[in-house]
Each structure stands twice: as structure tokens, then as C-alpha cells.
Image (cartoon, grey):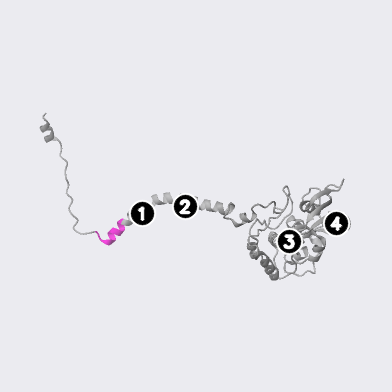
Amino acid sequence: MSPRNMLARSPQPRLVARSPRLWPLSRSTRSVRAQRRTKRRRPRVLVMVIPVFAAMVALLAALYAWGPLNPVSAALAGQGPLVMEPGWSGSGSPVVRVKPALALSVLDVLEVKGRAPRNSYDRLAFGVAWLDVDRNGCDTRNDILARDLTQKQLVKGAGCQLGSGKLSDPYTDRELDFSRGAQSSKAIQIDHVVALGNAWQTGAQQLTDGQRQSLANDPLNLLAVDGPTNVQKSDGDAATWLPPNKAFRCRYIARQVSVKAAYRLWVTPAEKDAMKRVLTSCPRQPTLESGYVP
């Protein structure tokens, strides 16, 4: 077959002429079609954007929880054990577990009330002083001395009893010598940061026997300090007594706030005002965690 005949027999493409639009689309029709196109495209955009956004949120949350964006983490950076030396395993029972937070923030959520009557107060309501709550063979007093003193020497044949040591007293900022004896031991005493008399009048009457015993022996609420200064404090709260060492006041008040929160004690209006005045000068001061786990 000749090339000419082949061309003659090959099918020719059909050309369909579109008739011109006689009138433009109405505005409503164009809007509907635009919305349809948008709806068709939107899922593809969301599939790409949502995972990226979720990843960014997770990253920011992680930075805030553990990294430099968290003011609490920044406040705790470089500090050692906050409450007890490693290995402490108390068996007390605080009401709630207070994790590190800003002391000012925790103070703001404490209940504010007047003092309850003191006429029924009895030290024995908090248990016998001192108990061996962690069952390590040493009572709480010796545990706290071992925690807070340096250059410690044990009494021979007396287990964990300290015979001597040195204390950097947080209340007076003085170096004190400790020597065990009927009279010399009074030079260094174990202070209840929230005094038991104050605790009784600010909610401890409603605690169980076990919770009051825990409050009296919790290392969070105990510090080895200068004896005469501790006697001067007595059962005073922040409105009536603060440590003479001004550099320690922020940590002292933060510890009081931590104790009050852990045992659901309230503060009086005057006490809260005094606490806030101190903490305002150190707004990043953190609370401390109880040595016990409820």
C-alpha cells in the first residue's frame, strides 16, 4: 500500500468545538466552587502541618519541664540533696507530697485562718521525742545531727551516737562545736522549723496520730541549730520570729511553706504577710520535698 493510501485510511482526530459561554458564572457559583477546591486541598495541608505543630508543642513542653525554660529547674540547678542525704528512707506519712515548686506560688494556695485554741496542746500528741522512724537503729535527733554536722566523731560502742562535730549554724551564721554531754548538748539543738505548738494551732489537731508523729520527725521540718537561738524562737511563727542570719531567711521560709503544704496546715494573715515579704526578695526560691512519701 502506498504511503498516500495509508494516510488516507488513518483515522483523523475529531475536533469538538466548545460553544462559548454566553454568560459569566454568578458570584455565588464561583464562591461555591472555590470552597469545594479549598476543602479538597485542606486535608493535605493539615496532614503536613499538624505533626509539625505537635512536635513543636512537645519540644516546648519538655524544655519547660526539664530545661532552661522552667524557672524551678533553674532555681535548683547546682544544688545538692534538698532534704536528706542520699539513702534516707523514712516511714512517715505526710498528708500530701509537695514536689519542688516556687515557694511564693505554694504560699498563695495555703489556707488563711486565725489560730485555733492552744489550751488542749500536748507534746505527746506528736509522739515521744525522739523516735527511730526509719528503723536504722538511730533516733531522729541523731539522724539530723549526722546530716547537718561535719567532722563527726562517733561515741565508741554507742552505735550511731555522735560524740563531737562542727555545725555551720544556719540561724546565726556561726561555726559551733558540738560535744555530747548532759549540758554541752544543749548548745546545739534540733529545731522544728514549723514549731509543734504553732502546728497544733494551725491544723495539726485535725491530723491523725501517725501524721502528727510524721510531722514531728520529718527531716523536712528539722534543723540542727544554735541552742539559745532556738530557745528564743520558741513556738514563734514567721510573724513573730525570723533567723538573725538574714541570708538564710528565704530558705527558712521556703521550708516552712513546704511543711505547711505537706501537712495541710494553714497560715494566719499576719504569718502569710511576713512570709510573702521575705519571699518577695527571692521569688525563685523553691519549696522542698518531704523526706517521707505519703
Disc 4 marks a residue whose amino acid type is Ser
Q: Which residue is mark 1?
A: 39
Disc 1 marks a residue whose amino acid type is Lys
Assign the C terminus to one quadrant of the image: bottom right
Disc 2 marks a residue whose amino acid type is Phe
Q: Say which element carries label 2.
A: helix
- Residues tagged 4 and 1 counted as in contact (Cβ below 8 A): no
Q: Say which element carries label 4.
A: helix
Q: Say which element carries label 3.
A: loop
Q: Which residue is mark 4?
A: 185
Q: Which residue is mark 2?
A: 53
Of pointers 3 and 4, the one earlier in the residue sequence: 4
Of pointers 2 and 4, the one earlier in the residue sequence: 2
Given residues 56 and 292, the one toward you in this image is 56
Q: Which residues are magenta?
A: 25-33
Residue 32 highlighted magenta (yes or no): yes
Disc 3 marks a residue whose amino acid type is Leu
Q: Is residue 170 left or right of residue 186?
A: left
- Residues tagged 1 and 2 counted as in contact (Cβ below 8 A): no
Q: Is residue 26 left or right of residue 226?
A: left
In the rendered image, is residue 64 in sight? yes
Residue 85 x/y as whole percent? 73, 50
Q: Which residue is mark 3?
A: 207
In the rendered image, is residue 234 in sight? no
| Separation (CA) of disc 2 from disc 4 | 63 Å
